[in-house]
Image (cartoon, rainbow, N blue to C red):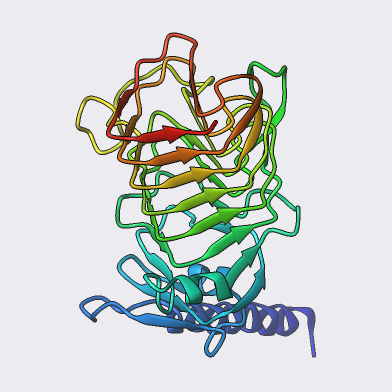
Amino acid sequence: MDAGTLGQLLVLFLLAAGVTAAALRLRRLKPAGLPPRSLQVPAEYASIQAAIDAASPGDTVVVAPGVYRENLDFMGKGITVTGRQPADATMVAATIIDGDQKGAVVTFNSCEPPEAVLCGFTITNGSGQLEFSLNVLGSSARAGGGIRIGSESGPVIRNNVITGNRADLGGGVYACSISLALLEDNCITENQALLGGGVRVAGDFRKSRTRDHYGQGQALPFQLRRCTVSHNRASIGAGISIDRVSSPVIVDNSIHHNVAVWDGGGIAIWDRSSPEVRGNRISCN
């Protein structure tokens, strides 16, 4: 067999391999016009992240009770990731995402739309995402032990227990104030950080623009509604730290039994921030 024939065979082989790989990928995508799918973990996908990778906008990833040692990234997708019964406290306690101290347990950092929903989990043992940008702690720090919400990401996070996480900034949750993120009906407890033991909301050190990525001309605020923020620890802002010119909405929450070393046992509001804080029960901090 001469060299030319070998070359032609090699080209045909590579083309066939490419077609096969593309066909396998297409089998995992939702064809246009079909209704949203329900992707089952672990019955159909061994891990939650594998199901997220396979999901298309509008799909729902349904997770059975169990312990999943993973660090999830929504990858900008407008999908729902949910435990089987997110309104049942017993089922939420039994459906655990364990970050194994390998970073933020769940990350929203790719302009996720409000259709990105996380509900029905216990989120624990996270250590935050390493940030290499100017911040009050120096050139780098770990942010968002349990959940990390980046600039212009707008997920809805509800009916979760966020507990036992640690980071430099935002032990339970770190959120950039330039976002559409909504946290409601969560329990954020027993997390630890230097700034914001339970939650830290701060402006983005790398961006100064005030529009949101949906073209509405002005950034909508981060919102924390009907959450319990308790038994968290920090140097500043044990329950919640709001800083770097942030204006989140903090409404109808229960904020209690948080302990700060320096300032803001319940809430620390500083660095030219002007949040809307109303209807909260703030006690025993």
Where does the N terminus fall, quadrant-wise? bottom right
Any part of residue 234 in sight:
yes
Which one is nearer the viewer's eye here, 71 or 168? 168
Where does the C terminus fall, quadrant-wise? top right
**Identity of the residue drawn at 44% across and 47% down:** 228
Which one is nearer the viewer's eye here, 144 or 197? 197
- Residue 256 in the image, given as x and y percentages of width and height: 50, 38
Q: Is 51 placed left or right of 279 in the picture?
A: right
- State the count of labels: 0
- Residue 94 in the image, given as x and y percentages of width and height: 57, 75
- Residue 4 in the image, given as x and y percentages of width and height: 72, 79
**Identity of the residue drawn at 60% across and 49% down:** 146
Any part of residue 109 in sight:
no
Q: Is residue 220 above or below residue 269?
A: below
Which of the 4 quarters of the picture holds residue 154?
A: top left
**Identity of the residue drawn at 61% across and 53% down:** 163
**Identity of the residue drawn at 52% across and 88% down:** 44
Q: Is 231 placed left or right of 166 in the picture?
A: left
Q: Residue furthest front?
A: 284
Which one is nearer the viewer's eye here, 284 or 19? 284
Q: Is residue 48 above or below residue 133?
A: below
Q: Residue furthest top?
A: 272
- Residue 222 in the image, given as x and y percentages of width and height: 36, 35
Q: Is residue 39 above or below residue 127?
A: below
